[in-house]
Image (cartoon, rainbow, N blue to C red):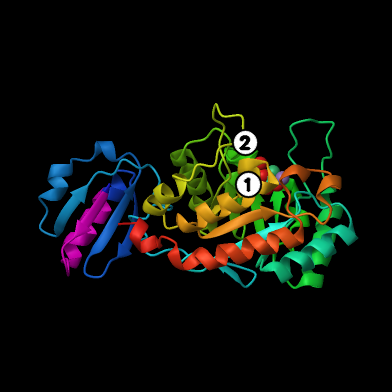
Amino acid sequence: MIVVLKANPDPEQLDNLTTWLTSQFITIHSSLGINNLVLGLVGDTSVLDIDLIKSLDIVEDVKRIREPYKNANRKFHPDDLIVDVGGARIGGGHFMICAGPCSIETEEQMNAVACGVRDGGATLLRGGAFKPRTSPYSFQGLGGNGIELLIKAKKAAGLPVVTEIMEISQLQYFDDVDMIQVGARNMQNFQLLKELGYVDKPVLLKRGLANTIEELLMSAEYIMAGGNENVVLCERGIRTFETATRNTLDISAIPVLKKKTHLPVMVDPSHASGIADMVKPLALAATVAGADGLMIEVHNDPPRALCDGAQSLTPEKFADVARAVLAVRPYAMTAEELSQ
Ligand code: PEP
Ligand code: MN
């Protein structure tokens, strides 16, 4: 529920209202708009008499909002969130291109890809060390040793890095990592999300294969409720009846999310399609539809990649995609247009 107060509310009446709401086990998030103070009420607001609150002298308007997320809700945070990832920014007009291999394999591979994607226009380097593979017999990633190689590549290329966490005990390896990725398969690992709420690093939260946009926002809410407000969302394709592509890129998720939340929205055309040749058209579509960034898998030798080679671009092809993306950026829908 949102309570919009009249300008310059009487302090005593305001105090009475907040004391009464608190006694009803309601938590109050207040934010100051241009003219009015807005109270966001969190808790079981069904116990509150909306007409009674509306009738108070200091109250301009009361709205019940259906969305159960408050921290991630644009209604409470009209301005776009800008997330700083080790100096690279995303959101509020800042566009981020994240690129790198699905899995960290060797020092040579990581350094070659890191420098390749940097030269091609990437602002954030990716690489998986803890890999959530469908089969237990597939390459599971190099774990902590992989993160060491990622940090070497970070230094070699001068790019900040993002890598995936699968459980909170792995956080010990993340000291020099700039952004923590929660993969699609862990989007509803609520215990992990809660723990990440207490971590002082931005989180890249990928949409689950079969999760709704509202569920994605509720998962962001888990992280933000713990105090970590630096969450970036990522649409990476969802399961549909279509089999021509690995997943189906839900382009609509971009305008829907931009309306509902102030959090930056990234798109991963690599996992969405599973096919290297489709990365460029999907990346262009996502950019023009208003995405704040892209995550693209790049490998120096895709046919020999230990994971996701079929969808990986060479550094040269990646540079071509990045160039094309930056060329269409002036035609992209802005957050302002999308959030109206
Ligand atoms: C990844 O980015 O390496 C990954 C495993 O992606 P997703 O969680 O979207 O499948
Ligand atoms: Mn992958």
Q: Which quarter holds ligand 1?
A: top right
Mark 1 is on which residue type?
A: Met
> Which residue reaches farthest top?
241
| Classed neighbour count for the residue bearing mark 1: other residues with Cα under 10 Å, few (<14), some (14–19), many (≥20) | some
Q: Is 11 a magenta residue?
A: yes
Q: Are marks 1 and 2 in contact (CB under 8 Å)?
A: yes
Q: Is 222 a magenta residue?
A: no
Work out whether residue 323 or residue 184 is closer to the camera in this orientation and state it.
Answer: 323
**Which residue is located at x 51 percent, y 60 percent?**
292
Residue 178 in view of the camera: no
**Which residue is located at x 38 percent, y 65 percent?**
79
Q: Is mark 1 within 8 Å of ligand 2?
A: no
Q: Which residue is mark 1?
A: 278
The quarter of the displayed image where residue 45 is located: top left
Q: Which mark is residue 245?
A: 2
Q: Dot 1 lies on which element?
A: helix
Q: Earlier in the sequence, mark 1 or mark 2?
A: 2
Residue 273 in view of the camera: yes
Work out whether residue 143 or residue 48 is closer to the camera in this orientation and state it.
Answer: 143
Work out whether residue 6 or residue 113 is closer to the camera in this orientation and state it.
Answer: 113
Mark 2 is on which residue type?
A: Thr
Left or right: 37, with 274 as reference point: left
The quarter of the displayed image where residue 121 is located: bottom right
Number of labelled discs? 2
Residue 111: x %, y % from top left: 84, 64
The magenta span reads 2-20
Q: Dot 2 lies on which element?
A: loop
Work out whether residue 254 or residue 127 is closer to the camera in this orientation and state it.
Answer: 254
